[in-house]
Amino acid sequence: MKLDILAVGAHPDDVEMSAGGTIAKEIANGKKVGILDLTRGELGTRGSAEIRDVEAQDAAKILGVSKRHNLGFGDGFFENNHATQLEVIKIIRKYCPDIVLCNAVDDRHIDHGKGSKLVSDACFLSGLAKIETIHQGNHQHAWRPKQVYHYIQWKELTPDIVVDISGYEAQKMQAIFAYKSQFFDPDSDEPNTPISSKNATDSMLYRNRNLGRLIGTEAAEGFTVERLPAVDSIFDLI
């Protein structure tokens, strides 16, 4: 199966928190989207890897993604190296996405910046024919995505482009709250974390609406880019 978009996150819930509205909108527009999680989030203070496995699949169903995989890299300790790059390359070549979405280039959690660079490097290397990969017994052909976009997470980075997600914010928040172990729950006995407060989830809504305000829509998500954004016509800008 070829995917139009492959969204990659260092942890289950990274993608939903930062690009869930964009994904929901593109799926509604007929695009095929997959999610790749690099780790199971096993070092998370709340919940467990097993709980997050289930939550990730629930969130995928809410968004309507076609595929979701987890590479099982070590949470907190994975590296951007030959071995991890090859595993990401295999997934890129398997699904041949035109666009890859990945972690913020700079963020509070060390895995986010590492994941960002790992995926960006793998997208480039995936296009080199002399790098040979075999996935499920099949020799793979080289494939390089047309664009790599980095979503914005904890830090307030300035986006290079914004995507109007008006009408899809509720679906995004539903996917986020599929991670019941991680986000605000007044009845939970779990320890508090930076993302488990009501302020944290409120801030997600505020960011979406503030970006929407800035472009004259109800809600939006922001991304940073590696290449200059281009339009076919100046009238393509809303």
Image (cartoon, rainbow, N blue to C red):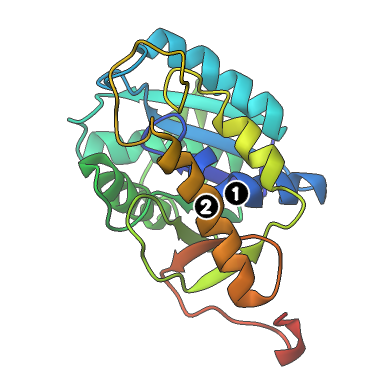
Instruction: Tell me what residue is drawn at x 71 percent, y 85 percent.
Output: 232
The residue wearing badge 2 is 100
Q: Can you give x and y, in whole percent of width and height, for residue 227 in the image?
A: 45, 75
Indicate the amino acid at tag 2. Val
Real-space Cα separation, disc 1 to disc 2, in angstroms: 7 Å
Of the 4 image quadrants, the one containing the N terminus is top right
The residue wearing badge 1 is 97
State whether residue 30 appears in this view.
yes
Dot 1 surroundings within 10 Å: few (below 14), some, or many (20 or more)? many
Q: Is 43 on the left-hand or right-hand side of 205?
A: left
Secondary structure under tag 2 reads strand
The front one of 57 and 193 is 193
Indicate the amino acid at tag 1. Pro
The front one of 114 and 41 is 41
Furthest residue toward bottom = 234
Q: Is 29 on the left-hand or right-hand side of 97?
A: right
